[in-house]
Structure formats: structure tokens, C-alpha cells
């Protein structure tokens, strides 16, 4: 019988994507001697920015806020491509020695909290092997979707299609679309990224959408900030750029929510300027919902509009009746010929990387659990997670969660407490969805996620400024948080 005790670390981070690397950086800066490890199911770091390899993959938020607070983004692109973001994450990990703490190929499947022992026992699969570690804290940086498969709705007739069907999450290396007719199904960030990229050498690219999305053009380079960087250096320029971009994104979001008609009018004028005269903006670019009720798509330097103007891309707003041998038949009766069909139809959401959580032997039912400040779970001790904003850059929240976690640790070190757990004892509290977002793929899986509450500190914090106040500066010992 093997009686060796499992390896113990103080903090176990799950996931080596943007959030996990950032969390580790904050942790080792604040507590240089503390033991921690990162368990990562893949064989490499970077998460999203390594997984997605489709042509043109890029951020759709500015890098000054998608970048970490502690590491200036010094590239001159404000909207960066996937490989540049991956390099940034890799460099962050390598420069701080974080990469040496990552255990690759470890898929965490179970985490069991024991109150008497004040520790997590974490089980990971590594090939056929089972690996067990224990830790005082568990920090889930697992993203929000399944890595093994993207979401594809059922379409009739896919078997009869004679061309290639590809999902952006599983883009085959070397897929050649040059000179081919391509149809991209979808209208989200991935579709609007793919269409102009493929249009560069495809015969024609058609974006087939069921309904339109708000699309705004943004300069890919921020000239003022690039100039400022040369004058005052990267650190100060980065701080200025972040403040400017946070202010811009908050004000456009607030304006969109409070005075949607102003934003709608502005977006329409901009589209009229960029699209051919007489283009049917009502059908293809005017959603039924308000701006920022769903994530708005940003296109750098109007590349999508340019491809439409040049005739290399077009948009069709219709519904698919079925796949045929040569392409698609639409509900309107129209047909689209295609050699390649890309199903940019979204992600399969997954909470906490599918880890089964138990507390003192009782399984944690996520849909029956409340999220505290959008970063801990009611009734689940010493557990922190990162889920970023849907209306601003993910990393803004990821940094704040890591800062809050370090403050928690510092307090518990000071007081000698070994356990912290948020508890709701307000019977009047009602629940709301954790992600305040209407996109189809989010709505489809939201019932599997924890809930937010109707009041602070359980209310969903989708406001960066609010979170700066509560997470960076707010009291740790509010009425809900119990230390022991
Ligand atoms: C195509 C695409 C474009 C995006 N663009 C933007 C953007 O422009 N701006 C923005 O703010 N957000 C964007 N997002 C959201 C994006 O996911 C975040 O920006 C960010 O990359 C999330 O980082 P993360 O580390 O939290 O999660 P991820 O990048 O998803 O990384 C999670 C890591 O955890 C690992 N993991 C998961 N489960 C387990 C487990 N059980 N055991 C071990 N390891 C596990 C995964 O393998 C992965 O490496 C985009 C998302 C996608 C899919």
C-alpha cells in the first residue's frame, strides 16, 4: 500500500491561460516564499490564445486593458493578433519563472474540501495516471468554455455536403481557402474576424447570419499612445492608455444602456460612410436589441466593411434550411454555393473546467450556489475563481480578483485564520444569472453556472469601477465573509 502523503502546496491554481499566469504573477510578487503550483490540462500555456488558430484570430478589445496591469503592452497594435497575445502571456510566464511552476497534461477532475483538515484534496488525470495534490487554497482560472469541442447546432444534410466543414475552434493546420467559395455561419466576434481575413485570397466569402450584430470600427493602432510611449516610456504611457480606454469603454457602455438611440445613430452613420451607397444596413447591421445588450463586435480599421466594399465578402441574413451537396439551402429559398463552410456558431460553456467540487463530502451543485463578488462561491471555503467581464476586457477583472485574493491571504496570515467562506443569510436575496449576457451560446448553458444575487456582495459586478472600489479597496470582513 502506498502511504506517501500527497504533495501539498499553499495555493493550487488550475489553468495556465491569461488568468492563471496573471494570478501566479500577483501571488509570487506579494508572497515570494509561498508554495504554489499550476495544473494545466493541455501541454502548453496560453489557453484561448493558443487554442484558437483560425486565420486572423485577434483580440476584439484593446490590448491596453486586455494586458495585465503589472506588465505594459508595448506592441504598437492596440488590437493585437492571437500569436502576439500568446507571446505576451508566454513572456510574462518566462520572465517571472512562472512557467517552471506549471504541471502540464494535468486535467483536474475533482476537488474536495475538508473543514477539519482545512485543505483541498485535488485529483487530476494525467493520461492514464491519477495525480493527487493537497492545497490550502484553490484558485480556478479555467476560462468559461469547453476546450474539446465548440458549439455546432444540428443542421440537416451535413453528410451530403461535398466540401469541407470546419469549426473555428478546431481549425485544421494548412486548410487552403485560396480561390475557394467560403461561407462563414455566424455573426459574432469570430465570424467578423474570419470574414475579412479569408476574403484576402478566397474567391468570395459570405457571412451567413440569422440576425445582425452591432459592429463598430476601431483604429488598430493608437497613434497618440504610441507617440506618448516614445516620450515618457512604456510604463507611464501604459497607465495613461489604460485609464483612457477604461474611461472610453465605461462611457460607451453606459451611454449604450441609457441612451441607446444616440449610439445606434452614431454606429449607423459610421457604417453608411464605410459601406457602398445604398447598402441594406437595416437588414444586415441593425440588431433588434440595444447596443451592448450583447457584446459589440469591433473590427480594426473597418476591415469587414472594406471587404464588403471591395466585393470580396458579402453578408446574407437568412436561416439555413439544410446543407446540400454544393452548399446551403436557405429558408427564403435562396442557395449559397460553398467549397468550405465555417461554423462560427459559438462555444460550449463550462464552469470551472468541469471540476466536481465537494465540501465536507457534499457535492457542490453549482446552479444552487451563489457567487460572491463574482469571484468566490457561497459555502465553498478557500476557493477563488476568475470569470472576466463581458462588457470590458477580461483581464481587468482577472487582475482585480488576484489582488483581492492576495489581500485575503495577507489578512489571514496576519490573523492566523485558516479558512474564509462567504455565507448568505439574507432570506430576501433573489438570484440572477451570473453572466449578464444575451448571446445565444451564453443563454444556452447559463443554468449550469452559479447564480449572482440581487444585492451586494452577491450582485454581479460587471462594472470595473465598482470592482476597483470593492475588490481593490473594499473591506474584506463584510457581513457575508466568515473567517475561521
Ligand atoms: C476566440 C476568442 C477571442 C476572445 N477575445 C477576447 C478579447 O478580445 N477580449 C477579452 O476580454 N476577452 C476575449 N475572449 C475571452 C477570453 O477567453 C479571455 O480574454 C481570456 O483569454 C481568458 O483567459 P483565462 O485564462 O481565464 O481562460 P482560458 O484562456 O480559457 O484558459 C483556461 C486554461 O485552463 C485550462 N483548464 C481548463 N479546465 C481545466 C481543468 N479542469 N484542469 C486543468 N486545466 C484546465 C485550459 O486548458 C486553459 O489553458 C476571447 C475568447 C475567445 C474564445
Image (tube, rainbow, N blue to C red):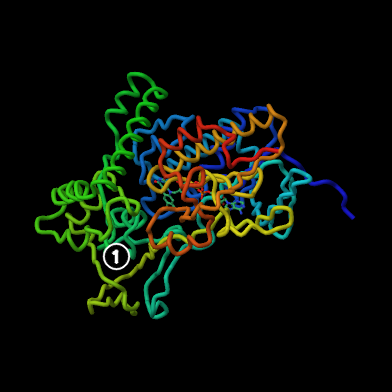
Q: Secondary structure at mark 1?
A: strand
State the quadrant of the C terminus: top right
Residue 291 in the image: state x and y as whole percent.
Answer: 27, 51
Residue identified by numbered label 1: 209
Q: Is residue 282 left or right of residue 13?
A: left
Residue 158 in the image: state x and y as whole percent.
Answer: 40, 77
Could you tell me which residue is drawn at 68 percent across and 26 percent down? 414
Camera-side residue of 110 and 195: 110
Relative to 181, residue 364 above or below: above
Mark 1: give few (<14), some (14-19) or many (20+) Cα within 10 Å: many
Residue 368 in the image: state x and y as whole percent.
Answer: 57, 59
Could you tell me which residue is drawn at 56 percent across and 31 percent down? 95
Q: Is residue 400 left or right of residue 333?
A: right
State the quadrant of the N terminus: bottom right
Camera-side residue of 446 and 4: 446
Residue 385 in the image: state x and y as whole percent.
Answer: 56, 46
Confirm whether residue 45 shows in the render: no
Relative to 412, residue 347 above or below: below
Location of residue 361 by image quarter = bottom right
Relative to 411, residue 83 above or below: below
Camera-side residue of 469 and 103: 469
Confirm whether residue 102 shows in the render: yes
Location of residue 118 by image quarter = top right
Q: Most extreme residue toward the top, as rendered?
A: 232
Amino acid at each position: 500500500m502506498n502511504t506517501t502523503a500527497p504533495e501539498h502546496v499553499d495555493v493550487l491554481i488550475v489553468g495556465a491561460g491569461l488568468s492563471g499566469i496573471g494570478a501566479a504573477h500577483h501571488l509570487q510578487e506579494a508572497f515570494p516564499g509561498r508554495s504554489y503550483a499550476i495544473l494545466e490540462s493541455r501541454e502548453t500555456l496560453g489557453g484561448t490564445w493558443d487554442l484558437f488558430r483560425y486565420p486572423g484570430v485577434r483580440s476584439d478589445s484593446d490590448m491596453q486593458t486586455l494586458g495585465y496591469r503589472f506588465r505594459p503592452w508595448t506592441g504598437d497594435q492596440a488590437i493585437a493578433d492571437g500569436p502576439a497575445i500568446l507571446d505576451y502571456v508566454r513572456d510574462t510566464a518566462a520572465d517571472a519563472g512562472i512557467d517552471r511552476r506549471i504541471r502540464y497534461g494535468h486535467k483536474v477532475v475533482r476537488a474536495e474540501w475538508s473543514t477539519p483538515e482545512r485543505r483541498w484534496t485535488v485529483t487530476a488525470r494525467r493520461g492514464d495516471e491519477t495525480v493527487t495534490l493537497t492545497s490550502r487554497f484553490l484558485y480556478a482560472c479555467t476560462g468559461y468554455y469547453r476546450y474539446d469541442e465548440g458549439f455546432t447546432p444540428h443542421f440537416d444534410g451535413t453528410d451530403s455536403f461535398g466540401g469541407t466543414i470546419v469549426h473555428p475552434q478546431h481549425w485544421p493546420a494548412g486548410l487552403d481557402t485560396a480561390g475557394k467559395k467560403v461561407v462563414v455561419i455566424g455573426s459574432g466576434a469570430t465570424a467578423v474576424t474570419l470574414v475579412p481575413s479569408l476574403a484576402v485570397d478566397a474567391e468570395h466569402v459570405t457571412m451567413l447570419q440569422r440576425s445582425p450584430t452591432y459592429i463598430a470600427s476601431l483604429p488598430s493602432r493608437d497613434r497618440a499612445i504610441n507617440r506618448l510611449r516614445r516620450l515618457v516610456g512604456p510604463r507611464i504611457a501604459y497607465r495613461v492608455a489604460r485609464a483612457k480606454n477604461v474611461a472610453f469603454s465605461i462611457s460607451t457602455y453606459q451611454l449604450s444602456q441609457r441612451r441607446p438611440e444616440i449610439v445606434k445613430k452614431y454606429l449607423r452613420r459610421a457604417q453608411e460612410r464605410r459601406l457602398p451607397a445604398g447598402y441594406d444596413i437595416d437588414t444586415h447591421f441593425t440588431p433588434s436589441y440595444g447596443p451592448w445588450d450583447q457584446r459589440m463586435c469591433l473590427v480594426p480599421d473597418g476591415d469587414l466593411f472594406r471587404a464588403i466594399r471591395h466585393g470580396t465578402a458579402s453578408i446574407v441574413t437568412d436561416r439555413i434550411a439544410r446543407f446540400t451537396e454544393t452548399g446551403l439551402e436557405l429558408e427564403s429559398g435562396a442557395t449559397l454555393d460553398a467549397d468550405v463552410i465555417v461554423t462560427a456558431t459559438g462555444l460550449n460553456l463550462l464552469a470551472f473546467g468541469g471540476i466536481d467540487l465537494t465540501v465536507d463530502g457534499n457535492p457542490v451543485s453549482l446552479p444552487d450556489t451563489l457567487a460572491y463578488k463574482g469571484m468566490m462561491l457561497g459555502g465553498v471555503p478557500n476557493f477563488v475563481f476568475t470569470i472576466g467581464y463581458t462588457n470590458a476586457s477580461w483581464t481587468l477583472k482577472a487582475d482585480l480578483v488576484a489582488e483581492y485574493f492576495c489581500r485575503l491571504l495577507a489578512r489571514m496570515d496576519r490573523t492566523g485564520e485558516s479558512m474564509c467562506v462567504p455565507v448568505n443569510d439574507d432570506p430576501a436575496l433573489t438570484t440572477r444569472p451570473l453572466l449578464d449576457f444575451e448571446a445565444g451560446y451564453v443563454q444556452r448553458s447559463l443554468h449550469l453556472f452559479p447564480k449572482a444575487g440581487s444585492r451586494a456582495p452577491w450582485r454581479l459586478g460587471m462594472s470595473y469601477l465598482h470592482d476597483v472600489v470593492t475588490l481593490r479597496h473594499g473591506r474584506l470582513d463584510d457581513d457575508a465573509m466568515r473567517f475561521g
